[in-house]
Amino acid sequence: MGRVAPDDRSHRRRWIAVFGFAVVALAADVRAQTPIHIGQTVEGALEEGDRKMADGSYYDLYVFRGNRGQRIVIHLRSREFHPYLTLMDENGVEMLSDSGEHGHAQLRCTLPRSGRYFVRVNSVRREGRGRYQLQLLER
């Protein structure tokens, strides 16, 4: 008995559905962020009810506007979990990340273009929870 080849159109529809779901998930996540301004320090907490990464760890998402050529530094400090800090462009593409040491993660960057950027506060460990301080500065 011969093998039946899958219908090519059905295969394509499946991939379009998966891709569409990923875009919708990213768009929903990007809409659900907290604004932070250059020069601002915010207090926050990774806690039950926050969004979760694929590994099950909690995260908070912040957004700021930056200008091409602007030099920034981002600090994330916590005494309650091992911080993991990520900078993403306006499309959610990861640009930089740092897991830091001794409760302090830091990113330094010259922004490649003007627009929105996202900062994700996360923990190195899946069970990481607790309070943190996030600071966005121009250097």
Image (cartoon, rainbow, N blue to C red):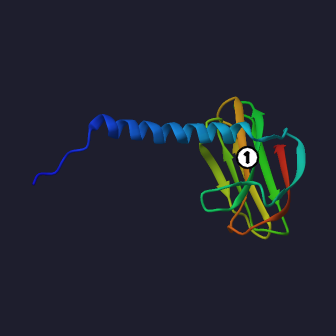
> Residue lying farthest left?
1
User: Where is residue 92 drawn, in percent x and y?
Assistant: 62, 41
Image label count:
1
User: Where is residue 12 drawn, in percent x and y?
Assistant: 35, 36
**Element at badge 1?**
strand
Residue 54 versus residue 63 in the image, above or below:
below
Q: Is residue 109 left or right of residue 11?
A: right
**Type of amino acid at the residue the image marks with label 1:** Val
Identified at 41% across, 40% down, the residue is 15
Identified at 61% across, 46% down, the residue is 94
Q: Which residue is nearer to you in this view: 12 or 93?
A: 12
Would you say residue 92 is visible in this rendering?
A: no
User: Where is residue 54 drawn, in percent x and y?
Assistant: 60, 57
User: Where is residue 111 drawn, in percent x and y?
Assistant: 69, 37
Residue 82 versus residue 10 in the image, above or below:
below
For the C terminus, give its image quadrant: top right
Q: Is residue 132 left or right of residue 109?
A: right
For the N terminus, give its image quadrant: bottom left
Q: Which residue is mark 1?
A: 119
Q: Which residue is nearer to you in this view: 6 or 118?
A: 6
Identified at 78% across, 50% down, the residue is 74
Mark 1 nearby-residue class (10 Å; few <14, some 14–19, many ≥20): many
Residue 127 versus residue 119 in the image, above or below:
below
Would you say residue 127 is visible in this rendering?
A: yes
Q: Is residue 45 left or right of residue 9?
A: right
